[in-house]
Image: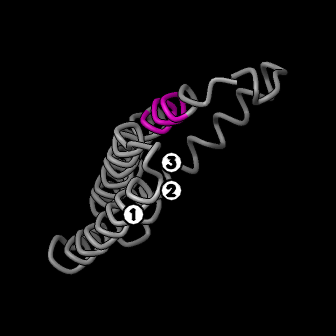
Amino acid sequence: MKFEKIPGVLFILSAGVYILGLPACFILASPGFALGFGAGGALVLLNAWASSRRVRKADFPHRGVAMASILGNFYLRLLLIGIFLFGFIRYVKVDPIGLVTGLSVVPAGLLVLLILIFIANRRPEEV
């Protein structure tokens, strides 16, 4: 099983869901909803990219230091995402439902990944 390939595939599928959903939101939904979807999707994809980059650069032979660094960075990013969400809702006036829909891009990418694994009739170890 190649664990290092799964985050990349998941990120690509999540970005694909985001890229397909963004024009659909601009065509079918209100501008506030589409702006919320765009902002939420960009935030969550940026967070996923930063998280995978941090884990790849971690020095796991020094497990305590690596875990403290990864967790500290996670909580810092979580705080920043909360501040950005507050700013988007309060000052930019995006639709909160669109923002939450945009934040669900990564779980939607995971669902697409599972569907593709099912269609290919392969076990997750073979991906």
On the rendered structure, is 86 left or right of 101? left
Percent of width and height locating residue 72: 34, 66
Q: Classify the position of the N terminus by image quarter.
A: top right
Q: From the viewer's perspective, is the residue at label 1 or at label 3 nearer? A: 1
Vertical placement of residue 89 versus 111, above or below: below
On the rendered structure, is 65 left or right of 90? right
Nearest the viewer among 107 and 70 is 70
Q: Distance between the residues labelled 2 and 3?
A: 6 Å
Q: Name the residue under label 1.
A: 68
Q: From the viewer's perspective, is the residue at label 1 or at label 2 nearer? A: 1
Mark 1 or 2, nearer chain start: 1
Q: Name the residue under label 3.
A: 106
- Secondary element at tag 3: helix
Q: Mark 2 is on which residue type? A: Ser
Which SS does the magenta portion mostly show? helix
- Residue span colored magenta: 7-15
Seen at 36% across and 69% down, the residue is 75
Percent of width and height locating residue 33: 35, 61
Residues marked 2 and 3 touching at CB (< 8 Å)? yes
Dot 3 alpha-carbon crowd within 10 angstroms: few under 14, some 14 to 19, many 20 or more: many
Point out the residue furthest to the left here. 91
Percent of width and height locating residue 77: 31, 63
Q: Mark 2 points at which residue?
A: 104
Dot 1 alpha-carbon crowd within 10 angstroms: few under 14, some 14 to 19, many 20 or more: few
